[in-house]
Amino acid sequence: MSRPVRLTVNGAPASFDVEDRTTLLDALRDELGLTGTHAGCEQGACGACSVLLDGEIVRSCLLLAVQAGGRTVTTIEAVGSPGRLHPVQEALRRHHGLQCGYCTPGVVLTAIDLLERVADPDEEEVREALAGNLCRCTGYAGLVDAVLAAARDAGPGR
Amino acid sequence: MKPAPFAWHPAGSVEEAVSVLSADEDAKLLAGGQSLLPLLSLRLARPTTLVDLEDAGLGVLEIADGDRAQPAASGDSRVLVAGAMVRQRRLELDPLVAATVPLLADAARHVGFPATRNRGTLGGSLAHADPVAELPAVAVALDATVVATGPRGERRLAASALADGFFATTLEPAEVLTAVRFPAAGPGHGAAWCEWSPRLHDFPDAGVGVAVELDGTGALRWVGAAACGIGGGPLPLGDELAATAAGATEATPGLLRAAAGAVTAAARGAGDGRDELCGLLAARALAQAFRRAQDRQVAS
Amino acid sequence: MPRTEDARLLTGLGRYLADHDVAGLHHVAFARSTLAHADIAGIDVAAAATLDGVVAVVTAADLRAAGARPLSHRLAPPYQPLSWELLAVDRVRHVGEPVVAVVAASRAVAEDAVELLDIDYRELPPVVGPAAAMAPGAPLLYPEWGTNEFVHLEGSTAGVEEALAAAPHRLQESFESHRVIGLPLEAHGAQGSWDPARGQLTLISSAQQPHQLRSVVAEACGLREAAVRVISPDMGGGFGNKQHFTREECLVGMLAIMTGRPLRWSADRTEALTASVHSRPQVHHVDAGFDDRGRVVALRVAVTSDLGHPVLYFSGIGPSLVTVGALSGGYAFPEVGWSLSAVATTTCPVGAYRGFGQPQAHLSTERVLDRIAQRLGVDPLDVRRANLLPAEPRPWRTYSGGLVDCGDLHAMVDTLVAEFGYHEWRHRQAEARSAGRHLGVGLSTLVQGTAPNQHDTAARFGSLETAMVTVLPDATVTVAVGTKSQGQGHETVFAQIAADALGVGPEAVTVADGDTGRLPYGQGTWGSRSTVMGGGAVVTACRRLRARMAAIAAHLGLTLPEEGPVDADVLAAVAATAWWVQHRLPPGVEPGLSTTVTYTPGRTNPSADGLQNHDETYSSHMTAVAVEVDPATGSVTVLDALCVSDCGVVVNPTLVEGQHQGAFAQGLGNVLWEEVRYSPDGQPLCATLLDYTIPSSLDVPRLRVVHQPTPSATAGGFRGVGEAGLIALPAAMVGAVEDALSPLGVRLNSTRLHPPAIRAAVRATGWRPDPAAWAAAGLEDRRR
Ligand code: FES
Ligand code: FES
């Protein structure tokens, strides 16, 4: 009952065979080994599994892998590397915006999605944008500071 | 927490979807999936086939001439036709929606989160019929018309005739909700969606949408309203508000108190004090709608 | 200093439990009881066992045949006897109790197989809530006990009764803490693999205490401890929920042995919410006597604690024991008496969660002080000042044997008053009241035991920590420690501690934790113990090494100071000599530069009177919150919150700040939105994150933190941090919300500050909102 799926993941063509019932979350993790996308609930309620689909933030547990056929998916693995962090990642690091790190990939992608749309968000807008990304560790203070700082550092030229 | 097996069927047209549904009574439509996927993962929904409407051509969002037989409440006889697969995110952000059906835009930003609104659809929300969902109540508040296509062709029904209790609609098993036609706002139009949830971003305990139309003299000549979170489906409140607010030129404290009282009475029976909450929200939404209508009149 | 672990966690390169795929990995799903209480009349596995992709379907009988041993709570009388097998035998006693295990090629197939099982339950009456459990004629979970009371304990100072009888004023009330869950964002789980050639079981588990888990798994699987290696990888939070040595972890070990396949169980969110570990449910009947100045002269608390189905190591009794020992907190109550009735019910086991029994105790003490203030018509701040420990003596011996070594609490309260602007807030409150708004202020003056130990009950916990510190030949440093970070940033903290003690840069230090293969023993992370105990072990080991290094340097004619930075060339020469040139070492000096220290501060040994100081040290946290309540909706908005904190020597202020913010958010969530609910027939009503609602970024304001540290007497001077918000917030919030609504006459006796509960409490007073005013007030609120 498997079906071949072809798509673009992190800028490169990817393909796998999955059952129709497989979520994009599971396919990314199990078929492509992209374990940076985390399962926090598999119920669409926590945001830990957030990825970009054709450049828009979505929850990969709320999408079947087969639905992503022919589309473009961006996961945390394509955003910065330990030696060269993305500005949002760097800001999270500087402002202690993570503790256990389990929510973090989803937070990073959600923040990037926000800053794509709103160049200089205020605190309220940042909190609003992150409201779907539950974090049990940080109390959000460092996380909000980080996104505000990342926006500031990106400067008016954004 | 993994779904039980099913077959995914991407439908290239509404007709194709209808024929799959007709052939298999355990097939189910997939229209964004932001509510359906959790139910699948929890194995609370167990379809044999998921008919995906993604590519069925239901993404239209345009102004059209209204249906003369069912006169729009507004002075404008045009309608906004929104296809079932229009994303909630687009309802929230598209200027066309904000200009022509402001209540829809105002309510859409309360639906889920940006990440779910990017996938979740108008038709999916109406067909899922979650009693706490905003969009079905918006459709009822505005006297919108729902368009559905089934084995016997297309039919239209009033939004208020769609709901059929908790998570149920009056659609036939093989019918596909294809579009919703919202009356377009005229110059004296103002609308507001107000809801209250325990966490700031959550399913609401109650939500109320109010739209008003002021005439040339600034007097209220039409009001539409409905609530979510009370009972098994959208609670129409237009009559209650019309009875208290018709002809009013200001949302005076007295008017708001009367409106809240009438709405609370209509919502009676909702637990946890949600009836009273509903009344308060109606008062706030009415005040806001009034103000926006006045602003719009001044601006035009 | 930013954290070392962040670079990998930020880029998706952390390796959590579920990120350990290996060739041939199989997956485990459990059939869990769907009923609260039932006999199992039969299990038919035939259909499940023949499903494509299924490798094994295992029942309790199969486990027994394979040599699995039952677990027991390891408690002696007066605790009721209790042991349980890894899967339920004959009877289930809570929804979610595991009955059958399925091993399959994928989790999805394993779940398909679970659905094909035919388990014949004969329903028995449920027991939900301690009142039902203790009602005459209640159905019994364990008929052999003759009761549902798992244990009844009492303790008292000598003069409680007399002092109560003679007290000028008395108050008698009940206070309730409701059931919540710690809810790490990564649910629990374990992955096992069995090497038959070596007879070695490797268990990767998202566990807070890998070494102690090893003991339990070895026992359950019938192996020697040396045959089990437990690895705790990156963890997505723990908060006490991952320290219970669960049946499921043992099952994964057994299933790996039985099937010979590597396999993993990752709890899904529903399992985590309904079938892991809940916390907190207690009711306190309080009787307090006080004088005209608001001083408590005697406090007696009867605690009823709901243990759920107590099939946890130590039966989850630990938090309740902490509760009855922590009833005086930072206060000089001269007489204290208590009783504890811990009751079994047919609900999910109740155990550890950050705060561990202290929030419930603190709720009662703070509520008592607030009530005294109300009765006497004085400021609650003054009542606290009247009762706080005097500056001398230290340690202060508590009724339960505690040796409280905290700093000057009065000075901390002075700081709180100034920094929070207590009097200004009272002023604002008065103004708001006259404008018809409902502002309130709540206080908590907390002294919290840290690095705890319960020799007498939790016999396998003890109070030690182990660290191995090595200066390698290239002068870089490795630290292995027996604590286990779940997100607290130990790699950074211990690197800083070691770097500081050794006089090297923190970047020279690599820290490893969570692997029984690297260090003989350790006790993991819980009870704010890591910096105190792990830090103490690391500091002690480093000091030892540094003394050795200094001796070698001197022998080589080089200078290596006792403190402060060490010259890189000197260090290089010393390291090379120590490892490679033994004949140049001073006589009697051990070669190499590695040492393993097992450290105990030694302050928790029982004293001659039989009482025990249960905590190696104490941290203090003075908290004030200002809230506004909308009585119409029941919503509570925190306007300001400040904590004056003494957690001893601060290693990394940023990380301490993070601990405070995180605990604050959880404490707030616990009271404002969270509750694990059950239906009357014992069905869990919170199976998803839509039912169990933790706060989001929109709901949690920023806590202001002010440090007023005093070093403890433990090695390094640390006091521990991380639980203050969980303990302080519920009490402070109940006080603040009640204060806000006091003009309406609302009284609050429970931690349920959920909007519907507040709404109901307000309604009961007859107060009704004015819709016109409410509508106008919200017109500008862009968030609603
Ligand atoms: S795992 Fe997808 S939203 Fe939680
Ligand atoms: S850092 Fe642990 S959940 Fe966010």
Image (tube, rainbow, N blue to C red):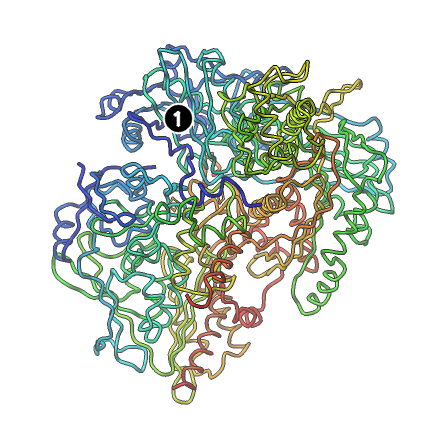
Q: Nearer the viewer, residue A96 or C394?
A: A96
User: What's the residue type where badge 1 is placed?
Assistant: Gln
Q: Nearer the viewer, residue B69 or C199?
A: C199
Residue B246 drawn at (x, y percent) = 42, 80
- Which residue corresponds to the image point at 41% horizontal and 71% vertical from the top-left? B210
Residue C126 drawn at (x, y percent) = 48, 30
C40 horizontally vs C627: left or right: left
Q: Specify the quadrant that holds the N terminus of chain B.
A: top left
A66 horizontally vs C451: left or right: left
Q: Specify the quadrant that holds the C terminus of chain B.
A: bottom left
Residue B198 shows in the view: no
Q: Nearer the viewer, residue B57 or B274?
A: B57
Q: Is mark 1 within 8 Å of ligand 1?
A: no
Residue hosting label 1 = C191
Residue C337 drawn at (x, y percent) = 76, 30
Callout 1: SS: strand
A100 horizontally vs C560: left or right: left
